[in-house]
Image: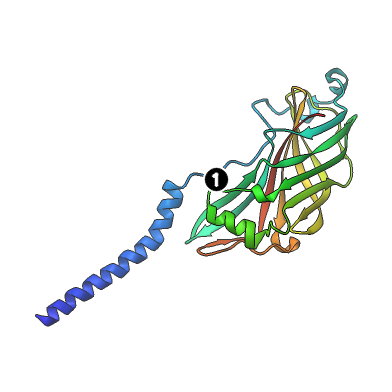
Amino acid sequence: MAASSRGSRWRWTVAGVVAVAVLAVAGPFVYINFIKSDAPAPLTAATTAPTTPAATRAGQSASDGSIAGTYSVTSGSQAGYRVKEVLFGQDTEAVGRTSAVTGQITVDGTRVTAGDFSVDLTTVQSDKSRRDNQFQGRIMDTATYPTATFKLAQPIELSSLPADGATISAKAQGQLTLHGTTRQVTVDVSAQRAAGSIRLSGQIPVRFADWNIPNPSFGPASTEDHGLIEFLLVLARA
């Protein structure tokens, strides 16, 4: 009788250990794939208007009118980060954003001659408060380094002015400051001209160690050694 009781307890113990192991693996899989909402799509300048091929843009500047002037960041602008995470073997994406973006660009003919932007990192939020606490504290130390900035280092040359509603691509070189460290970066940007405003979007690859940023991994979540800064700037003539 005693042996039977010990055998029963052993079977229940083994069953409990197996159940815990199954939950440890299946729990994150179920949460990430069936409960957790998908990460927001990347920010993009393009609206519903189709992209105009480069071949059809030549000579449009004369008919479309000048867009020269200074343009300031307005509502609808966003900036933030996108980092791949692994949680108990399951791949997911961490995305945090803020609309606290300021700055402006200067356009002269077919050249963007100046650009300067600032992001209030203390307002960046994701879908998880625990992740946000890590971002504000250990990772980005926003109490010491509350802002990220980008300053255009040389003019952006456009072959011609885009037609209203068309999307074009260009490269921007500038100085990115994060976590108190400034480095030169080259950014692929997309721009769309629409109803007197300009929409700019892009992503900047960031290797954390290059800006003295601690790896974001914490607890059961591990990340790569790099991520993306993404932005959408909606600019209106000042």
Q: Left or right: where does residue 223 sit relative to residue 5?
A: right
In this orientation, which residue lies closer to the viewer: 186 or 76? 76
Q: Position of residue 125 (x, y in %)?
A: 60, 48
The residue singled out by tag 1 in the image is 39
Q: Position of residue 130 (x, y in %)?
A: 53, 56
Q: Left or right: where does residue 20 sit relative to residue 114?
A: left
Considering the image in quadrants, where does the C terminus appear? top right
96 over 18 or under it: above or below: above
Q: Residue at x 53, y 51 (%)?
A: 128
Color scheme of the displayed model: rainbow
Considering the image in quadrants, where does the N terminus appear? bottom left
Q: Left or right: where does residue 159 sit relative to residue 142?
A: right
59 over 115 or under it: above or below: above
Q: Residue at x 81, y 57 (%)?
A: 182
81 over 141 or under it: above or below: above
Hey, which residue is sitting farthest bottom in the picture?
3
In this orientation, which residue lies closer to the viewer: 206 or 150? 150
Hey, which residue is sitting farthest top in the picture?
63
Q: Residue at x 22, y 76 (%)?
A: 10
Q: Residue at x 78, y 54 (%)?
A: 177
Q: Does the rendering let one see residue 225? A: no
The residue tagged with tag 1: helix, strand or loop? loop
